[in-house]
Amino acid sequence: MTNPNDVPADGTSKPMETRGGKAKRASSRDAISILQDKVTRLEDNTNESRDRLDVVESRLDTLESRGGDCKDDSQDLLERVDIVEHENRVLKDGLTELEKAMNVLRAELNIYKSDVANGVVSSPSRVLADVPKPKEFKGSRDAQETDTFLWSMNQYFRNTNTVDESTKVNIASSYFTQSALLWWRRRCADYDGDVPVDTWEELQDEIRKAFYPKNAQRELAQSYANSSTKTTSMTM
């Protein structure tokens, strides 16, 4: 029977709480707690992953920045190399001009010595100014250009009374430019293992070998052969 004391004042009956209901509610609270723990751990893992991602992105930015710095350093180095190479070219050009000036002074000195030996007092600078200077030799593989240069140098030596062989070689080489200058630098450095060029005659031979076209060399040899034949016929 129902205990009258358990009846509410409004006359309704209060449901009885069984052991099974308590167990179910306890089990539900545990499941919720477990789920909450999992959510918390997942949130923590997510935040940790985001932090790691931020670190990775930061490192990536740093690496990219360093890569840019390396590129900047390389570009700066290349620019410095270009500057040094330019200065080197300027120095070489200046050295070439200096050599030309020295050769002019040598030629003036030769004229002055010749005038003194002949008892003539004159201004070598004024005399040298009247002597036409040879044109620069670029080293084109053209027989006519090569012959013209050699002929003009011989005329220059004759007019300036230049007789010293070493001086002739120095003066002639000071008129080399472009391919001829490159060839001469290698030649002076014994690039091909050849013997040094000490005389003007040797230099002329080297120039012909280096810059005469092969067909021009054959024509020159044939011309010399024909000249020798004619000379022999005339003497007989």
Image (tube, rainbow, N blue to C red):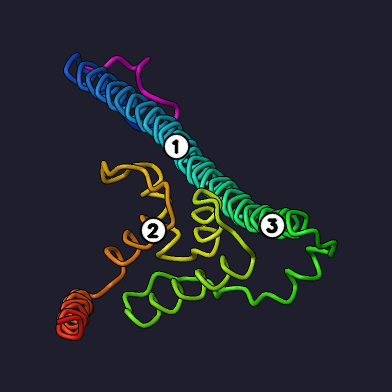
Q: Earlier in the sequence, mark 3 or mark 1?
A: 1
Structural distance between the alpha carbons of marks 3 and 1: 56 Å
Closest to the camera, between mark 3 and mark 1, is 3
Q: Earlier in the sequence, mark 1 or mark 2?
A: 1
Residue nearer the viewer, 37 or 100:
100
Residue nearer the viewer, 166 or 80:
166
Task: Decide if residue 216 is on the left or right side of residue 155.
Answer: left
**Magenta segment range?**
1-9
List x then y, in percent, for residue 159: 62, 70
Q: Is residue 31 magenta?
A: no
Would you name the residue on which mark 3 appears?
Answer: 101
Q: Secondary structure at mark 3?
A: helix
List x then y, in percent, for residue 231: 21, 81
| Amino acid type assigned to the residue bearing label 1 in the image | Leu
Structural distance between the alpha carbons of marks 2 and 3: 23 Å
Residue 201, numbered label: 2
